[in-house]
Structures are given as structure tokens and as C-alpha cells.
Image (tube, rainbow, N blue to C red):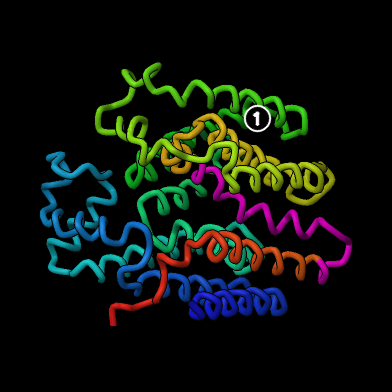
Amino acid sequence: MSIYFIVLFIVITLALTELVLDDKRIVIITGTVLALFAGLRFYLGYDFISYGDYYNEANQLGMIFDGSIRLESGYLFFSTLFSSLGFNYYAFVLFFSILTLAIFTYFLYKYLPYPSMVLAYYYGRFFMARDMGQVRGSIAAIILLFAIPYILKKQPLKFLLIVFLASLFHVTAWAFIAAYIIHLVIDRVTWKNSLVLLIIATISGVFLQNPALYLWAIPSGYAAYFTNPHYTSGPWLLYPILWMQVLLLFGMILFLNDKKIDDFEWINLLMKIYLISPLVLLATGTLETVGGRISTLFATVEVLLIPYLFLSLTKYKLLNVIFYIGFSIIIFLLIFVLSGMYERYIPYQTVF
């Protein structure tokens, strides 16, 4: 398991180097390291085998339209394209890893002053738990980040276009429309409106745990996610990630909810989007898979907010950076190591 700590050390070192040199181009190296680390894996991650089965089955471009494989057309296009051209599954995994990290790296480079610092936190928070598997939801969540600036600019058509592109990889991307709505409804995230919405979402979770009330409205292909115990036995109020998000949200309200700070308009929007994540987890009750897949679309902005949060803790920048790096390491240990997730990732093997 030492390889995962080595990569963590490399990512943190690159992040600190970027900070010292004030050169955001270093993120290209950081993103490349993560892309290759994920792309060269062999039988690692939650969905490696299942997506391999899909890849072997989808060997003709015509399958994109005939409905024989229940996958979104965007993902299916790349899968069938590579398969029909004679590339093996491992080449496709490498391509998809590079594509996902390239899109994410470009976003960070374009919109953040220190993108590698974001990747230092992202490595423990989302990379191992979600994006290391390079599932469809991963690239959808990253594509949706590009829709956020169009919320600020009040350009709904461009916003919907990005959502549509993301939905070509995972249908849950349409839920991101809630981000545009909450921006219009709420001026800023406060203690009061957060608590009210969290309580309402909790009450909703009680009813959504009874699919008999609404199963008639669920497409038959997705009914299992609402009825099969494998997908409906989540911890709900005992879910550690839920409480972590709630605590982080209140921390952001305490330290970031100030119109005098730089980039307040941007931060305020990100906080609104982040608020939706615990609301979804609460409102979906024990429907763990449904809640998790929708929630992660909004939770991704956490990696953008955490640097702002820690830079606002004290007036000493060096101390803030130390706290941030320390917190990133703690998150990696909690999510990847102490949770037992690492058992799915050892030993790390490559295609070579």
C-alpha cells in the first residue's frame, strides 16, 4: 500500500512547489501523475471488471443507438469506438483516465490560482474513492464544473448545454439544474436557511425510503436502485460523509460568508452548490446509491472551497498552508485507509 502514500507525497510536493514558485503550470505535471496512476492500473477500483465486461460487449458503433447496452451515449461512443478500432480495454482505461484528468486539470488551471494545491486535497477526497475507478459519474461531475461560471453570468442556455454534455456520460447530470435554481432562490448561504433546508430534507428522507409512494414514476430500468436491498440499505443519518459535509458547510459559513473577502461572489455560489450535496444525502434516506450518485455532482465543489476555507483561518499564510496540507492528509487517511477502502486497491498492479 506504500505506493498510495508515495503518490500522496508527490502530489503534495508538487503543490508546495507550485505555491513557492507561483507557477500554476506545475498542475500539468500533477494532473499527468494522477492520470497515469489511474490509467495504468490493472484490476483495481470498484468498477474495473464490470466496465471491462461492457467494453467487450460494445464492439460496434451501431450499439450506441440500438439500446442493447444500457449506458449513456457519450461513454458508449468512446467505448465502442476504441473497441471497434481494435484497442484492448486497458488502452481505453488509460485514454479515459487521461481525458478525465485533462478536463479537470484544465478547469483548475483556468479558474484557480494554485490548482495543484486543489489536487492535493482532491487526491484523498475524490480521486481514490471515485475517480480512480474512472466511472461515468466521475467525468460527468467534472464536466459540470464548467457550467458553474454560466450560473454567475446568468447564461442559462450555455449552462444547459454543459449539463447536456455531462448527461451523455451519466444521466444524473440533469440534477445539476438544481444549482441554477438555488442560486436564484437563495441570496447567500446562512445558518438559518441551511438549518431549515437540512430539516426539510431530513423529513423528505423519511418518505423517500418508501418507494411504493412514487415507484410508478421511476423508469423500469432504474427501479432496482429504489427496491433492491443492495442499493437501499444505506446508513442515512449515520453516514460519516454526510456529517463531514455538514460540519464543513458550517465552517464555510463561519469563515467565508463575508462580502469583504476576495472572490466572494464566486465563493458564495460554490457554497450554494455545496449545500445541495448534504440535502440530497438527507432527502434520499437509505437510498445510498441514488443519493451518492446525485450528491457527488454537487460535492465536487468541495475541493474548490476547502483551500479558501483554510486560507481564511488565520492571518498567517504559512500556518494556513500547514493546516491545509495536514487536513488533506487526514482526509486521505480517513476515507482511504481507516474506512478499509484500500483493500480494493492492493496490491497496486499495472498493465505491464
Q: Nearer the viewer, residue 138 or 19?
A: 138
Which residue is pictured at 53% across the width and 63% down the height? 336
Residue 160, percent from left and from top: 44, 36
Quarter holding the C terminus is: bottom left
Q: Per the image, is 303 magenta?
A: yes
User: Which quarter of the picture shows residue 270?
Assistant: top right
User: Which quarter of the picture shows residue 309?
Assistant: bottom right
Q: Main secondary structure of the magenta part?
A: helix
Q: In the image, which residues are magenta? A: 295-319
Q: Nearer the viewer, residue 70 or 209?
A: 209
Q: Per the image, is 141 magenta?
A: no
Q: Is residue 314 rendered to the left or right of residue 325?
A: right
Q: Tell me if residue 201 comes above or below residue 332 in the rendering.
A: above
Q: Tell me if residue 183 comes above or below residue 74 in the rendering.
A: above
Q: Amino acid at mark 1?
A: Leu
Which residue is pictured at 76% across the width and 68% down the height? 321
What SS does tag 1 mark? helix
Residue 76, percent from left and from top: 23, 50
Q: How many marks?
A: 1
Q: Tell me if residue 64 comes above or below residue 213 in the rendering.
A: below
